[in-house]
Image (tube, grey):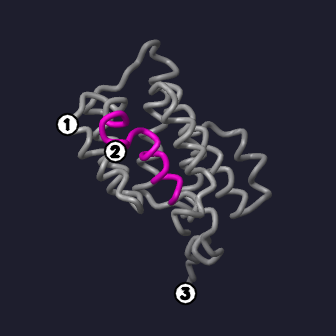
Amino acid sequence: MSLYDSKYEEFLFQKIDNSDLLSGFLIGHLVIEHLLEEIIASYDPKLKMHFSSLSHSRKINLINSLGLIPNGASSCLQDINKMRNKFAHELGYEPNKGEIKNLIKKCKDNFSDFTDGLEQLLGALENCDNLQDTCNDYGCGLADLFIQIVYDLEDYVHAPLEKKLPPLSIAD
């Protein structure tokens, strides 16, 4: 999928860049969850009802166990979910610069960085104290993290069926 084909890119930039960290993170998390639902529906529409009853973490585990997303991507999505849970359950939670950098580095290693947004974001964080400053000073921010993830998730939605089927084991 071409980066210009993403129907989420403009939405994420518009919604996240104009939000505080908490709101932006929740928006990105919601888009990820939506795409996870699209991935499972493209694999087997009959699973959609069951899938919608699962927690976010279990959705990631199910999709990963079916081989629909790689282990590294699954691990990154779990880390994003853990951070989202901290926002939800620790009133006033604000991730420190190290937590943000570690998450971005891990995502950079496990998702295609089509536009070098994650690389640019890491570089900007070296010179800034927080994501708001990277957005103001360098024009890159939290939206870049979620957009790079979305590009790959969209590819997983549209992956050919043969790539989605787990390998068959043939008994001798």
Q: Nearer the viewer, mark 1 or mark 2?
A: 1
Which amino acid, mark 1? Asn
In the picture of the structure, the residue carrying the numbered disc 2 is 104
> In the rendered view, would you say 150 is above or below 52?
below
Task: State yes or no: discs 3 and 2 in contact (Cβ < 8 Å).
Answer: no
Question: Residue at point 24% right, 46% down?
Answer: 123
Residue 96 location, x and y as percent?
A: 29, 26
Residue 95 location, x and y as percent?
A: 35, 26
Label 3 neighbourhood size at 10 Å, few (<14), some (14-19), many (20+)?
few
Q: Nearer the viewer, mark 3 or mark 2?
A: 2
Q: Which mark is residue 127?
A: 1
The answer to whether residue 44 is left or right of residue 75 is: right
Query: Which secondary structure lies at badge 3?
Result: loop
Which amino acid, mark 3? Asp
In the picture of the structure, the residue carrying the numbered disc 3 is 172
Residue 129 location, x and y as percent?
A: 25, 28
Query: Which comes before the other along the chain, label 1 or label 3?
Result: 1
Which amino acid, mark 2? Ile
Indicate yes or no whether the magenta region holds residue 35: no
What residue span does the magenta drawing correspond to?
134-151
